């Protein structure tokens, strides 16, 4: 555990970057520091590895005051990842990753073997080992930065807006990669970002800081979204925090129907029966049960295979039933031209469809159940839900 006790950082010109900050950062979890520019996020992170020394207060690592430890040894015991990766441009990718083990006295062969293992772990092809940073994409360079930080197997990983310099698609992939690695390794990660969506996706705990480095709220993401501490936190979270909170409600109990689902070999007579049930659209699947598209029943009078695939209405993006959240299901329904979301299993086969109205009812039920469990016997009286993020 990292304990930050009444830390203040005040510069000679009188600027206070961090003001009397106290936090307990749990082991084997991701704690995110988030807030507006000038709130002391990066300063706090750098005080943990003593790149910045505090004006007052102390920081404990597993009960030991870090200011009583040799600074070089402390820094080598912590991985550090920054924007744009901060790679050595004159070294190959393999040697970049092997940097810290070599500094710790590992021989070249052992260090390079470790680097090769980590390339695979972070999703880098071995063919990139002998290339130089300028020959890699931004996303690949960030993966190298993460691998380098993990090379000496440090218990603590500090990450300062590591994904902010890449495009949104790559950023989402890197976030998923970090969560996968964390699930395998269980590091104590302190992650700085200005992006509240990134904080909610990654964080087990989130510290919202005010300008001037004062703590506004420290809570799990679901509690943060459902019970912001004050107007500042509520404004920072934005007007769509209710939609974000749906990420914590599973789709597992969502009511599905298979009535509108027809395979390509469904006959005209069977189509007529479905149409008689007043189903507004039929979802056509291939022979493996994977979705092809929606069609109005009247256009399938010759059977489900009578309408060319290019004339079917797009089914949009399906959601994986049970693994993804109600937010995902709602997003799929809202974006669907028919207003219906398609639920699939892990192999992409249709398990049913659901309407916006059904999802709305599930959301209301989930809210009522969550609030009831929080205030009922053994609950926290509205002070915590114990919610778990779905499919981060």
Image (spheres, helix red, strand yellow):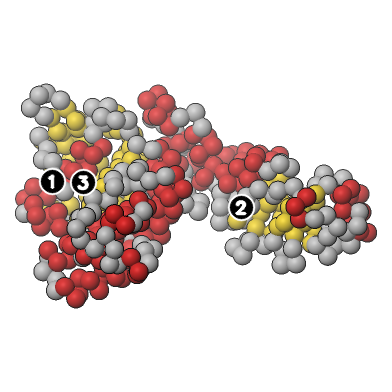
Res. 322 image quadrant: bottom right
Mark 3 against mark 1, which lies toward the viewer? Answer: 1
Residue bearing the label numbered 2: 319
- Is 67 above or below relative to 305? above
The residue at the point 54 percent across, 42 percent down is: 246
Q: Is residue 322 above or below residue 118?
A: above
**Residue 277 visible in the picture:** no
Residue at the location (65% across, 58% down)?
344
Q: Earlier in the sequence, mark 3 or mark 2?
A: 3
Going by the image, does 100 lie left or right of 388?
Answer: left
Q: Which residue is mark 3?
A: 3
The residue sitting at the front extreme is 135
Q: Which mark is first along the chain, 2 or 1?
A: 1
Question: How crowded is the residue under tag 1: few (<14 C-alpha within 10 Å), some, or many (20+)?
Answer: some
- Depth check, front residue: 338 or 24: 338
**Earlier residue among tags 3 and 1:** 3
Tell me which residue sits at (87%, 49%) in the image. Answer: 299
Q: Nearer the viewer, residue 129 or 115?
A: 129
SS class of the residue under badge 1? loop
Residue 275 visible here: yes
Vertical arrangement, residue 166 with respect to residue 9, above or below: below
Q: Residue 84's x, y, as percent?
A: 29, 47
Q: Position of residue 16 (x, y in %)?
A: 17, 27
């Amino acid at each position: 555990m990292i304990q930050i006790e009444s830390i203040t950082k005040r510069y000679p010109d009188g600027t206070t970057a961090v003001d009397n900050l106290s936090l307990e950062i749990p082991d084997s979890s991701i704690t995110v520091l988030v807030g507006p520019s000038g709130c002391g996020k990066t300063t706090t992170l750098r005080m943990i590895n003593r790149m910045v020394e505090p004006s007052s207060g102390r920081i404990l690592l597993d009960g030991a005051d870090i200011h009583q430890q040799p600074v070089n040894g402390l820094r080598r015991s912590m991985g550090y990842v920054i924007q744009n990766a901060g790679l050595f441009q004159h070294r190959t990718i393999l040697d970049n990753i092997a940097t810290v083990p070599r500094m710790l006295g590992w021989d070249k062969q052992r260090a390079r073997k470790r680097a090769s293992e980590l390339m695979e772990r972070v999703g880098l092809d071995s063919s990139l080992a002998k290339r130089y940073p300028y020959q890699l994409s931004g996303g690949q360079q960030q993966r190298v930065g993460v691998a380098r930080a993990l090379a000496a197997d440090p218990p603590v990983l500090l990450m300062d807006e590591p994904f902010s310099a890449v495009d949104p698609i790559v950023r989402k992939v890197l976030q998923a990669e970090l969560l996968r690695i964390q699930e395998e390794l269980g590091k104590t990660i302190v992650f700085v970002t200005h992006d509240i969506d990134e904080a909610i996706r990654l964080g087990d705990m989130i510290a919202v800081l005010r300008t001037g480095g004062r703590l506004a709220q420290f809570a799990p993401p679901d509690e943060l979204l459902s019970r912001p501490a004050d107007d500042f936190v509520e404004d920072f979270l934005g007007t769509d925090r209710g939609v974000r909170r749906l990420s914590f409600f599973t789709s597992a109990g969502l009511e599905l129907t298979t009535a509108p689902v027809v395979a390509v070999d469904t006959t005209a007579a069977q189509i007529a029966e479905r149409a008689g049930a007043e189903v507004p659209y039929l979802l056509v699947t291939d022979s493996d049960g994977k979705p092809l598209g929606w069609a109005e029943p009247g256009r399938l009078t010759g059977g489900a295979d009578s309408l060319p695939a290019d004339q079917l209405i797009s089914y949009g993006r399906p959601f994986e039933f049970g693994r993804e959240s109600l937010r995902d299901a709602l997003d799929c329904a809202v974006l669907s031209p028919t207003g219906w979301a398609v639920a699939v299993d892990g192999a992409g086969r249709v398990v049913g469809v659901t309407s916006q109205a059904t999802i709305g009812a599930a959301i209301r039920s989930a809210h009522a159940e969550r609030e009831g469990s929080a205030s009922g016997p053994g609950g926290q009286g509205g002070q915590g839900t114990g919610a778990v993020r779905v499919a981060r």
